[in-house]
Amino acid sequence: MATLTLERLLASMGFGSRKEARSLVRMGLVELDGKVLEDPFMEFKERPEFITVNGEEAPTVDKLYVMLYKPTDVECSHNARDHKSVFELVPERFTAMGIQSVGRLDADSSGLLLLSNQGDFIHKVESPKKGLLKKYRVTLARPFTEAQKAELLAGVMLKDERRPVLAREIEIDGDAVVVAIGEGLYHQVRRMFAAVGNHVETLERISIGPVALDRSLGEGGWRFLTDEEVAALS
Ligand code: URA
């Protein structure tokens, strides 16, 4: 394996090419434990935990596992057309590191969105085979009836799907309904409620498997997943 030099470390963290990383060092913008690092070719035996670049104290991870509290009116696409992109809510360098959204939320949905640059992790969390339930808190345009609940739990046919899709759990939470599903089909929750004659007005994802939305982030806020959260999802 190539020796881990400072320029390589910075490049692996999305701070540009190795040449650009060298310039950051030469401009005196890189610090470790409060000391400015001057040699871009200095070698590390192991990755330090944090390094400060241009005032940002950045964990030196090259694997990204991020939780974002997605607001409405933001798109889960790198080339958002009608709104801002979720990738504008996290440091720009994450895009250089190959960050992707794990599944999607509609532009008019909010809540828990995971982002990662690890293909295996993305695949596992998205795969219905892994069986991670996703829970959504929805408010509805019309009263939610026992008959609608029974239909959703039994399964409804959605256009272009071969099999009925079912709600795995349904609970009432004040004026909202919390529904759990196992898949992540296009507009799935909105289409399921439409199929039983209701209409979703607001939709917020509150959990994916064992990981719950961290409301302390506030809409638009993000944090790294803890090691325990990554392990619980993997
Ligand atoms: N189901 C939907 O209809 N929209 C979402 O954003 C997520 C699940």
Image: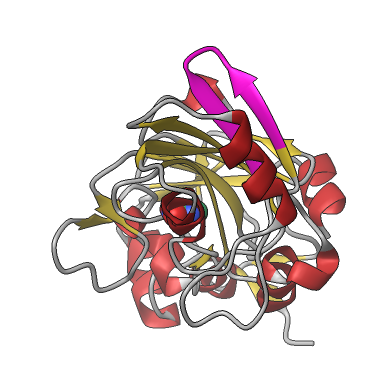
Chief secondary structure of the magenta portion: strand
Q: Quadrant of residue 80?
A: bottom left
Q: Is residue 178 magenta?
A: yes
Q: Position of residue 97 (x, y in %)?
A: 49, 71
Q: Position of residue 205 (x, y in %)?
A: 53, 40
Q: From where the camera sits, is residue 42 visible?
A: yes
Q: Position of residue 21 (x, y in %)?
A: 41, 70
Count of marks, rendered view: 0
Find the residue positioned furthest to the top: 174
Q: Quadrant of residue 164?
A: bottom right
Q: Is residue 209 above or below residue 195?
A: above
Camera-side residue: 22 or 208? 208
Camera-side residue: 49 or 154? 154
Instruction: Tell me the quadrant of the picture where the C terminus can be found.
Output: bottom right
Camera-side residue: 171 or 63? 171
> What residue do we see at 59% from left, 18% from top?
173
Q: Is residue 20 above or below residue 84?
A: below
> What residue do we see at 69% from left, 57% from top?
166
Instruction: Tell me the quadrant of the picture where the N terminus can be found.
Output: bottom right
> What residue do we see at 46% from left, 68% from top?
186
**Apparent side of residue 166 relative to residue 17 in the rendered image (left or right):** right
**Apparent side of residue 1 relative to residue 134 in the rendered image (left or right):** right
Q: From where the camera sits, is residue 213 visible?
A: no
Q: Position of residue 185 (x, y in %)?
A: 54, 68
Magenta range: 170-180
